Amino acid sequence: MNTYTKKITAIESEKIKNILEKKGAVFDQVQYSIWRAKTSLYQVIYYSSGKLLIQGKDISSIVKFIDESAQFEDENKISNVSSLEGKYIGTDESGKGDFFGPLIIAGVQVDETNKQKFIDLGIKDSKKLDDKKIMELASKIKANAIHSVITITPVKYNELYSKFNNLNKLLAWGHARAIENILEKSPCKLALADKFGDESLIQNALMTKGKNISLKQMVRAESDIAVASASVIARAEFVKRMSDLSKKYEISFSKGVSEKVIEQAKQFINLYSIDRMNEIAKLHFKTMSEKILK
Protein backbone atom coordinates (compact mmCIF):
# COMPACT_ATOMS: atom_id res chain seq x y z
CA MET A 1 0.00 0.00 0.00
CA ASN A 2 1.42 3.41 -0.96
CA THR A 3 -1.66 5.67 -0.63
CA TYR A 4 -4.24 5.91 2.16
CA THR A 5 -7.05 8.43 2.67
CA LYS A 6 -9.61 8.91 5.44
CA LYS A 7 -12.03 11.62 6.54
CA ILE A 8 -11.17 12.68 10.08
CA THR A 9 -12.15 15.34 12.60
CA ALA A 10 -10.05 18.31 13.69
CA ILE A 11 -9.55 16.69 17.09
CA GLU A 12 -8.26 13.50 15.46
CA SER A 13 -5.94 15.56 13.24
CA GLU A 14 -4.34 17.09 16.33
CA LYS A 15 -3.77 13.61 17.78
CA ILE A 16 -2.10 12.50 14.56
CA LYS A 17 -0.01 15.66 14.39
CA ASN A 18 1.28 15.02 17.92
CA ILE A 19 2.09 11.41 16.99
CA LEU A 20 4.04 12.51 13.92
CA GLU A 21 5.90 15.24 15.84
CA LYS A 22 7.14 12.58 18.25
CA LYS A 23 8.34 10.55 15.25
CA GLY A 24 10.44 13.51 14.07
CA ALA A 25 8.34 14.60 11.09
CA VAL A 26 8.97 18.03 9.55
CA PHE A 27 5.86 20.18 9.09
CA ASP A 28 4.87 22.65 6.39
CA GLN A 29 1.80 23.40 4.24
CA VAL A 30 0.73 22.63 0.69
CA GLN A 31 -2.21 24.00 -1.25
CA TYR A 32 -5.59 23.40 0.46
CA SER A 33 -3.94 21.81 3.47
CA ILE A 34 -3.93 22.72 7.15
CA TRP A 35 -0.64 20.90 7.64
CA ARG A 36 1.75 18.45 5.96
CA ALA A 37 4.17 16.18 7.81
CA LYS A 38 7.18 14.68 6.00
CA THR A 39 9.72 12.02 6.86
CA SER A 40 12.17 10.16 4.61
CA LEU A 41 9.63 7.33 4.29
CA TYR A 42 6.23 9.01 3.90
CA GLN A 43 4.23 12.24 3.92
CA VAL A 44 0.94 12.90 5.72
CA ILE A 45 -1.34 15.75 4.62
CA TYR A 46 -4.40 17.00 6.49
CA TYR A 47 -6.62 19.05 4.17
CA SER A 48 -9.06 21.80 5.16
CA SER A 49 -11.83 19.54 3.80
CA GLY A 50 -11.09 17.10 6.65
CA LYS A 51 -9.37 14.52 4.45
CA LEU A 52 -6.20 12.82 5.68
CA LEU A 53 -3.79 11.58 3.00
CA ILE A 54 -0.81 9.31 3.68
CA GLN A 55 1.65 8.58 0.85
CA GLY A 56 4.90 6.63 0.64
CA LYS A 57 6.58 3.55 -0.76
CA ASP A 58 5.23 1.22 1.94
CA ILE A 59 2.95 2.94 4.42
CA SER A 60 1.21 -0.11 5.92
CA SER A 61 3.03 0.15 9.24
CA ILE A 62 2.50 3.90 9.74
CA VAL A 63 -1.19 3.63 8.74
CA LYS A 64 -1.71 0.85 11.28
CA PHE A 65 0.19 2.78 13.96
CA ILE A 66 -1.85 5.97 13.35
CA ASP A 67 -5.16 4.08 13.29
CA GLU A 68 -4.40 2.41 16.60
CA SER A 69 -2.93 5.49 18.29
CA ALA A 70 -5.52 8.08 17.17
CA GLN A 71 -8.50 5.80 17.90
CA PHE A 72 -10.63 7.12 15.05
CA GLU A 73 -14.27 7.75 15.82
CA ASP A 74 -16.93 5.81 13.93
CA GLU A 75 -17.97 8.31 11.24
CA ASN A 76 -21.61 7.27 11.36
CA LYS A 77 -21.98 7.10 15.10
CA ILE A 78 -24.42 9.45 16.81
CA SER A 79 -25.21 8.75 20.41
CA ASN A 80 -27.38 10.49 22.93
CA VAL A 81 -25.64 11.16 26.21
CA SER A 82 -27.60 9.01 28.63
CA SER A 83 -27.91 11.76 31.22
CA LEU A 84 -29.49 14.15 28.72
CA GLU A 85 -33.17 13.37 28.52
CA GLY A 86 -36.15 15.50 27.61
CA LYS A 87 -35.64 19.02 26.28
CA TYR A 88 -32.17 20.57 26.14
CA ILE A 89 -29.94 22.84 24.04
CA GLY A 90 -26.80 21.89 22.11
CA THR A 91 -24.32 24.48 20.83
CA ASP A 92 -21.40 24.37 18.41
CA GLU A 93 -19.36 26.70 16.19
CA SER A 94 -17.93 26.94 12.68
CA GLY A 95 -15.16 29.10 11.26
CA LYS A 96 -12.92 29.01 14.33
CA GLY A 97 -9.98 27.58 12.37
CA ASP A 98 -10.59 29.49 9.13
CA PHE A 99 -8.51 32.60 8.45
CA PHE A 100 -11.16 34.08 6.17
CA GLY A 101 -14.78 34.60 7.05
CA PRO A 102 -16.87 34.91 10.19
CA LEU A 103 -17.16 32.87 13.34
CA ILE A 104 -20.60 31.28 13.51
CA ILE A 105 -22.03 29.85 16.73
CA ALA A 106 -25.35 28.03 16.70
CA GLY A 107 -27.68 26.51 19.23
CA VAL A 108 -30.44 23.95 18.70
CA GLN A 109 -33.06 22.83 21.20
CA VAL A 110 -34.10 19.19 20.99
CA ASP A 111 -36.83 17.17 22.70
CA GLU A 112 -37.96 13.57 22.46
CA THR A 113 -39.84 14.29 19.22
CA ASN A 114 -37.28 16.06 17.03
CA LYS A 115 -34.29 14.25 18.57
CA GLN A 116 -35.28 10.96 16.95
CA LYS A 117 -36.27 12.72 13.73
CA PHE A 118 -32.79 14.24 13.44
CA ILE A 119 -31.12 10.90 14.11
CA ASP A 120 -33.28 9.31 11.39
CA LEU A 121 -32.28 12.08 8.96
CA GLY A 122 -28.63 11.08 9.40
CA ILE A 123 -27.56 14.30 11.08
CA LYS A 124 -24.04 14.09 12.48
CA ASP A 125 -21.01 16.29 13.11
CA SER A 126 -20.78 18.70 10.16
CA LYS A 127 -17.08 17.85 9.67
CA LYS A 128 -18.26 14.48 8.38
CA LEU A 129 -20.70 15.93 5.82
CA ASP A 130 -20.13 17.70 2.51
CA ASP A 131 -21.44 21.23 1.93
CA LYS A 132 -24.37 20.11 -0.21
CA LYS A 133 -25.64 17.74 2.48
CA ILE A 134 -25.06 20.36 5.18
CA MET A 135 -27.24 22.92 3.37
CA GLU A 136 -29.98 20.32 2.87
CA LEU A 137 -29.98 19.21 6.51
CA ALA A 138 -29.72 22.75 7.92
CA SER A 139 -33.10 23.73 6.46
CA LYS A 140 -34.71 20.61 7.99
CA ILE A 141 -33.20 21.32 11.39
CA LYS A 142 -34.44 24.91 11.35
CA ALA A 143 -37.93 23.77 10.34
CA ASN A 144 -38.14 21.30 13.23
CA ALA A 145 -36.35 22.96 16.15
CA ILE A 146 -36.05 26.21 18.03
CA HIS A 147 -32.60 27.47 17.16
CA SER A 148 -30.28 30.46 17.22
CA VAL A 149 -27.45 31.43 14.89
CA ILE A 150 -24.89 33.98 16.09
CA THR A 151 -22.88 35.47 13.22
CA ILE A 152 -19.69 37.26 14.24
CA THR A 153 -18.47 38.97 11.08
CA PRO A 154 -14.73 39.47 10.61
CA VAL A 155 -15.03 43.15 11.60
CA LYS A 156 -16.95 42.27 14.78
CA TYR A 157 -14.68 39.28 15.44
CA ASN A 158 -11.55 41.45 15.38
CA GLU A 159 -13.25 44.01 17.62
CA LEU A 160 -14.28 41.35 20.15
CA TYR A 161 -10.89 39.63 20.04
CA SER A 162 -9.22 42.95 20.88
CA LYS A 163 -11.60 43.24 23.83
CA PHE A 164 -11.26 39.68 25.16
CA ASN A 165 -7.71 39.01 23.90
CA ASN A 166 -8.57 35.33 24.20
CA LEU A 167 -10.32 33.06 21.70
CA ASN A 168 -11.93 30.84 24.34
CA LYS A 169 -13.55 33.86 26.01
CA LEU A 170 -14.86 35.02 22.64
CA LEU A 171 -16.24 31.55 21.95
CA ALA A 172 -17.87 31.42 25.37
CA TRP A 173 -19.54 34.78 24.74
CA GLY A 174 -21.00 33.45 21.47
CA HIS A 175 -22.18 30.14 22.95
CA ALA A 176 -23.82 32.02 25.81
CA ARG A 177 -25.66 34.33 23.39
CA ALA A 178 -27.00 31.35 21.43
CA ILE A 179 -28.26 29.71 24.64
CA GLU A 180 -29.89 32.93 25.88
CA ASN A 181 -31.65 33.49 22.56
CA ILE A 182 -33.21 30.02 22.66
CA LEU A 183 -34.24 30.38 26.30
CA GLU A 184 -36.10 33.57 25.36
CA LYS A 185 -38.30 31.46 23.06
CA SER A 186 -38.50 28.20 25.02
CA PRO A 187 -37.21 27.72 28.58
CA CYS A 188 -35.39 24.50 29.48
CA LYS A 189 -33.05 23.36 32.22
CA LEU A 190 -30.04 21.95 30.38
CA ALA A 191 -27.47 22.88 27.71
CA LEU A 192 -24.54 20.93 26.25
CA ALA A 193 -21.45 22.30 24.52
CA ASP A 194 -18.12 20.95 23.34
CA LYS A 195 -15.42 21.31 25.98
CA PHE A 196 -12.97 24.15 25.33
CA GLY A 197 -10.94 26.14 27.82
CA ASP A 198 -12.13 26.54 31.40
CA GLU A 199 -15.65 25.20 31.92
CA SER A 200 -16.63 28.37 33.79
CA LEU A 201 -16.19 30.56 30.69
CA ILE A 202 -19.62 29.93 29.16
CA GLN A 203 -21.31 29.89 32.57
CA ASN A 204 -19.84 33.29 33.43
CA ALA A 205 -20.95 34.72 30.07
CA LEU A 206 -24.59 33.70 30.55
CA MET A 207 -27.06 36.41 31.54
CA THR A 208 -30.33 36.41 33.50
CA LYS A 209 -32.15 33.46 31.92
CA GLY A 210 -29.01 31.38 31.44
CA LYS A 211 -27.82 31.66 35.03
CA ASN A 212 -30.36 29.06 36.12
CA ILE A 213 -29.54 26.49 33.46
CA SER A 214 -27.44 23.39 34.05
CA LEU A 215 -24.52 23.63 31.62
CA LYS A 216 -22.55 20.52 30.63
CA GLN A 217 -19.40 20.47 28.52
CA MET A 218 -17.68 17.37 27.21
CA VAL A 219 -15.01 16.29 24.74
CA ARG A 220 -16.52 15.25 21.38
CA ALA A 221 -19.89 16.71 22.25
CA GLU A 222 -20.68 16.52 18.50
CA SER A 223 -21.54 12.86 19.11
CA ASP A 224 -24.72 14.17 20.74
CA ILE A 225 -27.58 14.84 18.32
CA ALA A 226 -28.31 18.37 19.63
CA VAL A 227 -24.70 19.50 19.28
CA ALA A 228 -24.39 17.76 15.90
CA SER A 229 -27.50 19.64 14.73
CA ALA A 230 -26.01 22.93 15.94
CA SER A 231 -22.76 22.12 14.11
CA VAL A 232 -24.71 21.62 10.87
CA ILE A 233 -26.59 24.92 10.94
CA ALA A 234 -23.44 26.76 12.04
CA ARG A 235 -21.50 25.30 9.12
CA ALA A 236 -24.33 26.04 6.67
CA GLU A 237 -24.25 29.70 7.69
CA PHE A 238 -20.45 29.79 7.46
CA VAL A 239 -20.51 28.32 3.93
CA LYS A 240 -23.14 30.89 2.87
CA ARG A 241 -21.19 33.80 4.38
CA MET A 242 -17.97 32.66 2.69
CA SER A 243 -19.80 32.59 -0.65
CA ASP A 244 -21.13 36.10 0.00
CA LEU A 245 -17.61 37.37 0.80
CA SER A 246 -16.21 35.83 -2.38
CA LYS A 247 -18.91 37.49 -4.49
CA LYS A 248 -18.56 40.87 -2.79
CA TYR A 249 -14.79 41.13 -3.30
CA GLU A 250 -14.59 39.00 -6.47
CA ILE A 251 -12.00 36.69 -4.91
CA SER A 252 -12.72 33.00 -4.35
CA PHE A 253 -11.76 32.81 -0.67
CA SER A 254 -10.66 29.38 0.55
CA LYS A 255 -11.52 27.78 3.87
CA GLY A 256 -8.92 26.83 6.46
CA VAL A 257 -5.33 28.07 6.48
CA SER A 258 -3.12 27.16 3.52
CA GLU A 259 -0.73 28.57 0.93
CA LYS A 260 -3.79 29.28 -1.23
CA VAL A 261 -5.26 31.38 1.58
CA ILE A 262 -2.03 33.37 1.82
CA GLU A 263 -2.09 34.00 -1.94
CA GLN A 264 -5.69 35.19 -1.74
CA ALA A 265 -4.90 37.51 1.18
CA LYS A 266 -2.07 39.12 -0.78
CA GLN A 267 -4.39 39.45 -3.78
CA PHE A 268 -6.94 41.22 -1.57
CA ILE A 269 -4.29 43.61 -0.24
CA ASN A 270 -3.20 44.49 -3.79
CA LEU A 271 -6.79 45.21 -4.80
CA TYR A 272 -8.22 46.84 -1.67
CA SER A 273 -5.28 47.71 0.70
CA ILE A 274 -4.06 46.10 3.89
CA ASP A 275 -6.21 48.43 6.00
CA ARG A 276 -9.32 46.56 4.87
CA MET A 277 -8.12 43.07 5.83
CA ASN A 278 -10.29 43.24 8.96
CA GLU A 279 -13.33 43.02 6.64
CA ILE A 280 -12.48 39.48 5.54
CA ALA A 281 -10.04 37.86 7.98
CA LYS A 282 -9.28 37.03 11.61
CA LEU A 283 -6.27 39.25 12.13
CA HIS A 284 -4.81 37.59 15.25
CA PHE A 285 -4.01 34.40 13.28
CA LYS A 286 -0.26 33.80 12.93
CA THR A 287 -0.93 33.54 9.20
CA MET A 288 -1.30 37.32 9.19
CA SER A 289 1.85 38.21 11.09
CA GLU A 290 4.14 35.41 9.95
CA LYS A 291 3.07 34.74 6.34
CA ILE A 292 1.31 37.82 4.95
CA LEU A 293 3.00 40.79 6.62
CA LYS A 294 6.57 39.49 6.62
Image: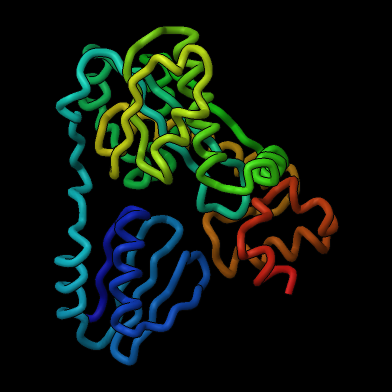
54 or 22, which is in the foreground? 22
Image coordinates for residue 4, horizontal then vertical, percent: 25, 71
Report whether 54 appears left or right of 103. Answer: left
* Observer able to see residue 245: no
Q: How many marks?
A: 0
Q: Is residue 48 left or right of residue 57?
A: right
Where's the C terminus, which quadrant? bottom right
Q: Residue at x 44, y 28 (%)?
A: 203
User: In the figure, 114 relative to 40: above or below?
Assistant: above
Indicate the quadrant where residue 225 lies.
Answer: top left
Q: Where residue 212 sits in the image (x, y, percent)?
A: 40, 14
How far across and down, in percent of the image, does residue 13 sit? 34, 61
Q: Is residue 43 left or right of residue 238?
A: left
Q: Nearer the viewer, residue 203 or 182?
A: 203
Could you tell me which residue is drawn at 79 percent across and 61 percent down? 269
Q: Position of residue 9 (x, y in %)?
A: 33, 53
Q: Quadrant of the N terminus?
A: bottom left
Quadrant for residue 200, please give it. Answer: top left
Quadrant location of residue 3? bottom left
Residue drawn at x 14%, y 66% as measured from the top left: 68
Query: Residue at the location (43% across, 46% down)?
Result: 197
Q: Tell which residue pokes out farthest to the bottom in this image.
A: 40
Residue nearer the viewer, 284 or 26: 284
How was this image coloured? rainbow
Residue 287, compared with residue 283, is above or below; it is below
Of the pair 140 and 24, the residue shown nearer to us:
24
Residue 231 in the image: above or below residue 226:
below
Tell me if I can see residue 256 in this picture: yes
